[in-house]
Each structure stands twice: as structure tokens, then as C-alpha cells.
Amino acid sequence: MDLPGSPTQALASAGTASRTSYPSRVCLITLSGGLFALDLRSVREVFPVESITPVPGMPSVLSGVTNLRGVVVPLVDVRPLLGLSTAGTPPKIGVVIHHGANQVGVLVDQVPEIRTVQQDQFLPAPQTGGADAQSFVSTILRIEDRMGGLLEVPTLLAHMDAAGAPRGNTRNLLR
């Protein structure tokens, strides 16, 4: 039996605290053949991207905007942010993600899959690769025989908001 305040109990409670922040339902997406996950609570909808209108003066990560049932939605290609290849056919599926008042459409390769995941499927993210990519991927998710990164939506949207667009324009596009 462990006494309150013992090292064993402290480790157990620290592990429990960190695990409770993981989502229980995720939206699996593919980017350049790699598997990634989004917390389902941050996903608004999935839609086919029929056209992309470029916006001059916006950050390079912003592919353009599209009309989604009368609403202008900014579209982001996150592959360069994650150090992934942008060669080949551009993605034509959008996943609208949101955090607070900000929302953006993320371009993905395939129609996403919704999964319920267990806490033991989350693993610490390795400390390799570019520092920029690490800030967008908080942990690794193990799904059957596949591994993928859990994308941090608040970090991604904060990066978009501060991505060097003319003052005020990015903020207006992301809301």
C-alpha cells in the first residue's frame, strides 16, 4: 500500500493527469501518406473541396479560400508545417477545425475516419525531427499496426493567426 505523497503515488497520479487530457474520439486523416489524428471535439465537418481561390498577401501555408454553403472558409495545407512532401496531386478534401472563435479548413488526402481510442494507445512523441513539426504534434497514437501524430489544433490555429499576413487579414479570415 502506498502512502499519500509517496513517490509511487505521485507517479501514478502524474500519469493519470497526463492521460486524462487525451481525446477519447479522434478523426484520422492522411497527409502525404502519413497518418495523423485530430481531437474530434475540434472537427466541425468534412467536405469535398471543389475550388480554391488564392488570396494575395496571405501566408504561404494558406492555400486560398473556398465557398462552403455561402461561407468563405480559409484552406490550409499543413504538409509544409509538418515537414511533409507537397509533391503530387493537391488534396481535395477539407476538414473544418476550430478552437474558440477561430476555424480553418485543413486539406487532407483521404476522407477521414472517426475512431474511439483508448488512453493506452497514446505514446510520447519522439524528440526527433524539426522543432516546428514537434510543436504541432503533441503525442503519437497507435491504431492497430499504424502510428500517427496527434495534431494540436490550438497550436496550429495560433500559428496561422501569427503567420505574417497583413495586419488583421488573417484574423478576419480565421473567424
Image (cartoon, rainbow, N blue to C red):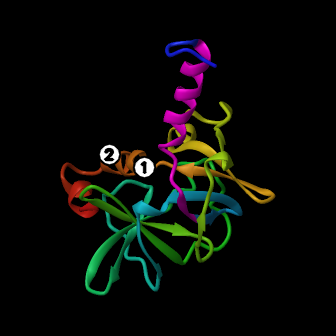
Amino acid at pointer 1: Leu
- Mark 2 neighbour class, 10 Å CA radius: few under 14, some 14 to 19, many 20 or more: some
Magenta part mainly helix, strand or loop? helix
Along the viewing direction, whichever of 54 and 1 lies nearer the viewer: 1
- Quadrant (top left, top right, bottom left, bottom right) of the C terminus: bottom left
Location of mark 2 (residue): 164
Amino acid at pointer 2: Gly
What SS does tag 1 mark? helix
Along the viewing direction, whichever of 22 and 28 lies nearer the viewer: 22
Where 41 sits versus 91, above or below? Answer: above
Q: Position of residue 87 (x, y in %)?
A: 67, 64
Identity of the residue drawn at 50% across and 16% down:
4
Identity of the residue drawn at 32% across and 62% down:
103
Identity of the residue drawn at 47% across and 43% down:
21
Location of mark 1 (residue): 156
Total marks placed: 2
**In this rendering, the label closer to the viewer, 2 or 1:** 1
